[in-house]
Amino acid sequence: MDKITIKNVDRGYRVKRGGKRAKEFVAIKGVNLTVKKGEFLAIVGPSGCGKSTLLDMLAGLAPIRSGEIFIDGKLMSGPDLDRGIILQGYALFPWRSVRQNVELGLEIKGVPKKERAAISQKYINLLGLQGFGDRFPYELSGGMKQRVAIARALAYDPEVLLMDEPFAAVDAQTRETLQDELLLIWEKTRKTIVFVTHSIDEAVFLSDRVAVMTVNPGSIKAVVDIPLPRPRNGIRTSAEFNRTRQQVWELLQNDPAALRVEKSYAGGQDVAELIYAAAAL
């Protein structure tokens, strides 16, 4: 059963340069994509291809120029509590404790205080934050802040989690730990997850399918099925993991438009090297 259906979605911006008349920059054009209920779908693509823009549209935070997005067969018209979004920058309120940040969505839903406390403690425990409920964001490491952001998104029980490079700001060891923890949470909750990342390894390790985007304008080039068994413990060193990673890498490498854009950003540096670096961030 399809949870999300994206039909012929376009998104453009008005860009004004040097006092000249504003021209429209088409960020995304003709995007068609479906996400099954309970699926973990990753989205990868070159820098500037519109991954985050697409996620913002799914969240209802960015307008759609044309096309439609459906959730459970119903036309999406804006933000709603059926979707939770987790960003790279945590977006925690600094004046609220960990517990108060986790309870934010529950407050908006009007959940009684006693029930909020029980639910927030459940997700504080689930994310390994026991003993930190009364701490404030400035007292936490980057990895712990991201755990709070995930706990907050899960606490009000959205049907869909939209994650925009949530682990990009943490060190490599913490990133792998958070990936493992996210999979454990997903296996317990079976939320539908749409996960944007620059990392091919991360996309292949986490997801059921990987959607590969082209750039200028952004569109879906291919959707790759991930044949790896679950649970994914120890899978990163397997031959099948490397074959699948290579398949996604080749789809990115063979995008002529992406090559042109990356070269223009880099002032003529080696293009293949740049795309690999962008994908590995």
Image (cartoon, rainbow, N blue to C red):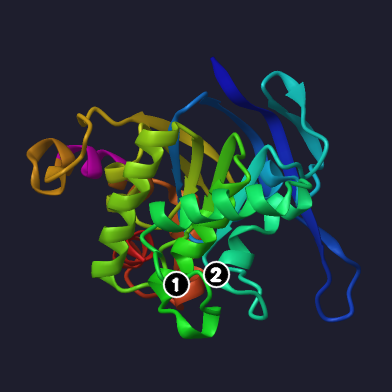
Q: Is residue 84 left or right of residue 149?
A: right
Residue 247 belongs to the span the image colors magenta: yes
Q: Where does the C terminus fall, quadrant-wise?
A: bottom left
Residue 280: quadrant of the picture: bottom left
Q: Position of residue 164 (x, y in %)?
A: 53, 56
Q: Position of residue 214 (x, y in %)?
A: 50, 45
Quick check: marks 2 and 1 in contact, CB under 8 Å?
A: yes
Give 9 or 216, whichever is nearer the viewer. 9
Magenta: main secondary structure equals helix
Q: Is residue 137 above or below residue 280?
A: below
Task: Give the magenta-colored segment's residue range.
Answer: 243-248
Residue positioned most to the front: 114
Q: Position of residue 226 (x, y in %)?
A: 29, 31
Q: Secondary structure at mark 2?
A: helix
- In the picture of the structure, the residue carrying the numbered disc 2 is 98
Q: Secondary structure at mark 1?
A: loop
Q: For the point 53% across and 61% down, which residue is it?
A: 149
